[in-house]
Amino acid sequence: MKKLGFGCMRLPMRDGVVDYKQFSEMIKIYLENGFNYFDTAHGYIEGQSETAIRECLTSKYPRDSYILTNKLSDFYFHKEEDIRVVFEEQLKACGVDYFDYYLMHAQNAELFKKYKECRAYEVSLKLKEEGKIKHFGISFHDKAAVLEQILIEYPQIEVVQIQFNYLDYDSPSIESRKCYEVCRKYNKDVIIMEPVKGGSLVDIPSNAQKIFDSLNGGSNASYAIRFAASFDDVIMVLSGMSNIAQMEDNVSYMKDFIPLNDKEYDAIKKVYAIINGINIIPCTACRYCVDGCPKKILIPDLFACMNQKNYHDDWNSSYYYQIHTKANGKARDCIKCGKCENTCPQHLKIRELLDEVSHVFDK
């Protein structure tokens, strides 16, 4: 496998639905350049990700020409008996007879308790015995100590998907480096998600941009993705590509992957220092928080406006705030129910952050 994975959570969209034409062209470019790893989950794009994969990938290409990963998300099961039903729905939605990788989705201390109570690991391992899963693993969003606990309890885990990028490398809340080190301690293959942190490592402050511009002409995404791919035992780095230009850029430098050199590492350290010194909200726009919001607040979009305000301090952030709140809730409409914080992989204090956003924009 080449190390660039196609993350199918942020696919090209047109009028609220996946743009099959553009997605199909992206798949063609990706496969023709020797890449083959696709990642999805039952709830991505409100279920559209799986069906788009069926229509644009699995119904058109031989099964042995691609590797498909899916996940068991906690939203879709409440007892052990639900799990096989969900799994069969996923196979049908994707149009396949088996998954190459099947991951227990977004594991943290609390979710791990539910998965254990419902015997989700045991059911999934049984599915592996039956040949419906080729490789078993987890995706993970918590501290390194929790990851170690899970790997001790379930040594059958083959692969761990972690959030890992140069901004979160030593983050006390994400613990990317420590989680990576736990994976290596227990000899687990590592898959990287959020290498560009939901796109926030693409649109960087102007003084940080000058540092990357002084290098060899690579894109901001290229330095972030190559940073993640340069670590030992990393078998795949996912990129949530949403248009052909992103696909072509990623393929150009990952087709014949070269690890970062000393000069590029030094540039990343300088860029990190600049970004880390700015008051930004480390939201990756996964949008898990939006689904359950009773006031229909587009939380990631409002956080993006706040970050743009802090990055550039221009009028565009206020303009887009009005666009995002025209038919949806404003930051001031938050009723502090906390549902968003319970689903946030970044462990953000969303209610407090919405108060800050409201203070800036709801005047």
Image: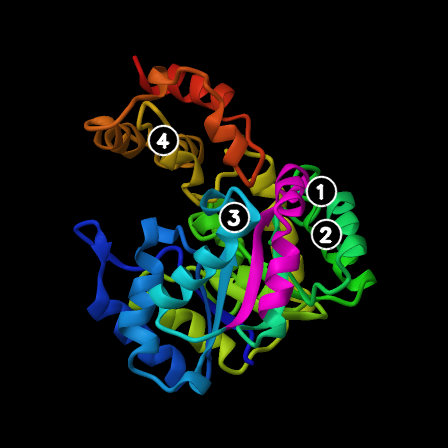
Q: Earlier in the sequence, mark 1 or mark 3?
A: 1
Magenta stretch in the rendered image: 99-127
Left or right: where 297 falls relative to 284: left
The amino acid pointed to by label 4 is Leu
Query: Which residue is denoted by mark 1 in the rendering?
Result: 143
Residue beneath the point at 49% across and 26% down:
350
Q: Which residue extends farthest front?
A: 81
The amino acid pointed to by label 3 is Ala
Q: Dividing the picture into quarters, in which one does residue 257 lie?
A: bottom right
Residue beneath the point at 30% across and 78% down:
59
Q: Nearer the viewer, residue 22 or 197?
A: 22
Mark toward the viewer: 4 or 2: 2
Label 3 element class = helix
State yes or no: residue 126 in magenta.
Answer: yes
The amino acid pointed to by label 2 is Cys
Mark toward the viewer: 3 or 4: 4
Instruction: Kindly report the distance in space between the C-alpha atoms of the residues bearing marks 4 and 2.
Output: 30 Å
